[in-house]
Image: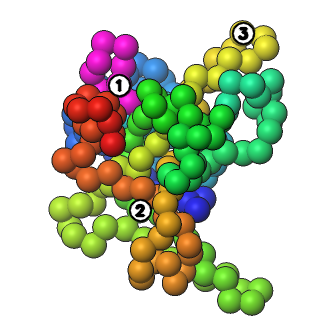
Amino acid sequence: MCGRYALTTPRTAVAEHFDALLSDASEAAFGNAGPNWNVCPTITVPVVRLAGDGRRELAPMRWGFLPRWYKTLNGGPLLINARSETIASKPAFGAAARSQRCLIPADGFYEWLREGKARQPYWLHPSAPDEALVAFAGVWETWRGPGGQTLDACAIVTCQAAQPLASIHHREPVTIRAGDEALWLGEAGHGA
């Protein structure tokens, strides 16, 4: 599971890295917000998605997916992650997995190793200097509340952890390689 991550890269650099437009909504949502070493669920995060015109945009989204049937923001369990093995068959994520994919930029993420009652945090990030920024696979949905309000919300797609991470935690975020971003977003081919 990915329950915390960091994004310290400035938004303009994130938008440039992913060849995405920095939307007015994104600028308004984040204002002068600086680096965040503790991105936690329910806050607004920058996400790369395809805009209506087919171009990439850096858009603000709530980290915590909201299925269409939730009547309130707290209408059910907090869905921050979606398992890659079952995402297509789950009612909450199926439609988004087919047509509303996104990239969730990060510098790295945290996992905690439990040993009895003690928990040891680990910072996990790319090891190569030229891979300072990563893209987690994500899905998103526009939630519509009963009062007419709308909110874009996302979840990080996770998979079975590989070694050596598996010795710390059994799940990890699905990381999209730079050459596969267009496939995941649906810009090329039929999706990943």
Tag count in the figure? Answer: 3
Residue at 25% x, 36% y: name it.
182
The quadrant of the picture occupied by the N terminus is bottom right
- First in sequence, mark 1 or 2: give its number: 1
Residue wearing tag 3: 148
Mark 2 in CB contact with mark 3 (< 8 angstroms): no
Find the distance from the CA under tag 1 to the CA under tag 3. 24 Å
Circle 1: residue type: Leu
Query: Which residues fall within the magenta stretch?
Result: 49-56
| Helix, strand or loop under label 2 | strand
x then y, percent, for residue 81: 59, 50
Residue wearing tag 2: 108
| Helix, strand or loop under label 3 | loop
**Crowd around label 2: few <14 · some 14–19 · many ≥20 (10 Å):** many
The quadrant of the picture occupied by the C terminus is top left
| Helix, strand or loop under label 1 | strand
Q: Nearer the viewer, residue 94 or 109?
A: 94
Residue at the extreme bottom:
116
Residue at 37% x, 68% y: name it.
125
- First in sequence, mark 2 or 3: give its number: 2
Mark 1 in CB contact with mark 2 (< 8 angstroms): no
As displayed, is residue 41 above or below residue 161? above
Is residue 114 shown in magenta? no
**Crowd around label 1: few <14 · some 14–19 · many ≥20 (10 Å):** many
Circle 2: residue type: Gly
Residue at 29% x, 32% y: name it.
190
Residue wearing tag 1: 50
